[in-house]
Image (spheres, rainbow, N blue to C red):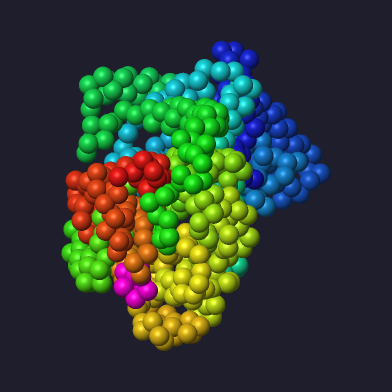
Amino acid sequence: MSLFTRSRQPLDTAEGGADSEDDTGGAGVAGEAAGAAEEAGTASGEGAEAAETASGEGAETAEAAETAEAVAAERDEGAEKADGTEEAADPAERSDSPPPGWFGWRRRYPRTARGVTIGTTVLAGVLVLFALLVPNRLERLGPEAFFRLPAEGILLAGLLLAVPPRSRRLMSVAAGALLGLLTVLKFVDMGFYSVLARPFDLVLDWILLDDAAEFVRESFGRTGQVLAVVGVIVLIVAVLVLMTLATVRVTNLMVGHRAVATRTTLILGTAWITCMTLGIQIGGVPLATKGNADFVNNRIEQVQAGLKDGRVFEKQAAVDAFAKTPPDQLLTGLRGKDVLFTFIESYGRVAIDDPAMAPQIDSVLKEGTNSLKAAGFQSRSAWLKSPVTGAGSWLAHSTFLSGLWIKNQQRYRSLTTSDRATLGSYFRKTGAWRTVGIVPGVRRAWPEGKFFALDHIYDSEHLGYNGPYFSWTPVPDQFSLEAFQRLEHGKKNRDPIMAEIILASSHNPWSPIARMTDWDELGDGSIFNQIKKEGTDPKEVWKDPERVRTEYRHAIEYSLHSLTEWVKRYGTDDTVLVFLGDHQPVPTVTAGSTSKDVPVTIVARDPKVLDKIADWNWTDGLKPAENAPTWGMDRFRDRFMTAYGPRGN
């Protein structure tokens, strides 16, 4: 028998519509007790008659007479219980009934059984209350979140007390299943807020679950992935089942104590209205809440918006200011230049603005600015607002390259299956550039590469790297840039190059991190085996948020050093470097910041290149000023195309 089911079947009374659905008895049990008393009386008389017969006739022995008197005593005791002096006999204890409880343990250990019954009832109540009050964000998961009055719980209790028995059972099961689903969704939201700083999208985010499983496999191996997936499935099923059973048990308890439950519901309802009207708070948290109603309403609006988003995006994608521009009028201000669009993973504004990181990052940027200036390079910097934060790099890359706001996977799929032109498309359209991609984070087929108009793609398997992975990162940034030099940029008698370069060393979880080494000693990457052994253990790092932030800073420093040193070493008069962050890091690092800003910088030795963007009012150097211009990342493509086209300065 389940701990979340009753040990007796509920009996409906004929009068008043009351239900005897609790374990303490009621009208139905009283009727059974009365019947037991009548039966006991009859048996008592029979026992006495037997005793008299045995005594008078002498046919039976004295022992038989004593036995008859004992039987009569037992019957009389049963009658007394039926009269109310003691607890009524449980029908389950009749000789023709199966043993109560699990293999009769309830009969053998009645006090333990009663303790288990009370304990499971309390646990059921706690589970229901938890489901009603648990928030969907980890930072709100404090004690004050559970000292509130949930409007939905009070309303549900009133409905369950009012409806007929059969409808009540169906309603309690449905309510329990719904609470379980809401709880699961809140748990998923916690994960999304922790990584992406936003809730789970019921329409557009299912594909990201597959990406999450793939990330676990790449970080912890196939076994870790299987265990994680199985664990999640078991957890979801357990939450749904336990929440349903808990709701049913609490419902039975309320009905069994209808009068008390009704009064309590009315009192709580009045208290909720009072607290809501007066705005009473505890620790800054409103005592009266309708959080679940708001949660469901927001989800409904989100689903509606998601279903409409496809049509909205289709209209936006149809507008392209350069679609009809002749090839000979495209990017005329950059002809003959090598143009490198370089993304630094998770390089967000927090790295520059956060007081705990700013001094070290500022030092790296100043050093880079000065060393590049000494090599004849100038730079300008500003801010771009990314469509994502925490993760989703491909959405940021496609936003930057396409000039469209790619904020979800649905838009990304629509974009990559359309004929929308990207920066790569326009460079290729001119016929003046060879377009290549350095994408070390790609470890399997990447059909979208064709959409981005890349003549050749070098993924992690084609960079000549034979060193170790650094957690998620397949190839250290310094090696990726050296491979680009070896495979494309360093070749003689070549055409100008437009390259999309993804630097992945600053990808979460930032442990262990590669470090700079002599460029001439990179070889095939084997040198990084020893460097990895000297690095930190991600399992230990992620136990402490401050260590996570420190390792993130180290990773950004490494990526910046790799890039600036490559420019100093291999840059020419024809080198034009545009580098930027793709998005802010996860909330563990941003520490509550809601900004989606990322730095963007243009570096060139030819002064004419930077003169073209003089009216952008960007900051001199690699570090953008706090008040430097901030654009949406989707606006960069058209502004760049305009500045370096025939209409530019």
Residue 7 picture quarter: top right
Tell me the chief SS of the magenta region.
helix
Q: Point out residue 91 in the picture as x, y percentages from the top left corner.
A: 66, 36
Above or below for 352 versus 143: below
Q: Point out residue 624 in the picture as x, y percentages from the top left corner.
A: 23, 53
Magenta residues, as a range? 563-571
Report the residue at 22% width, 21% height from top: 278
**Residue furthest out toward the top:** 16
Q: Quadrant of the C terminus?
A: top left
Report the front residue among 643 and 468: 643
Q: Point out residue 621 in the picture as x, y percentages from the top left corner.
A: 22, 59
Residue 248 picture quarter: top right
Left or right of 649: which side holds 397? right
Above or below for 490 versus 419: below
Report the front residue among 209 and 293: 209
Above or below for 333 versus 220: above
Q: Is residue 640 magenta?
A: no
Above or below for 16 versus 393: above
Report the residue at 36% width, 60% height from top: 576
Report the residue at 58% width, 15% height from top: 17
Q: Is residue 626 visible?
A: yes
Q: Quadrant of the N terminus?
A: top right
Report the front residue among 457 and 572: 572
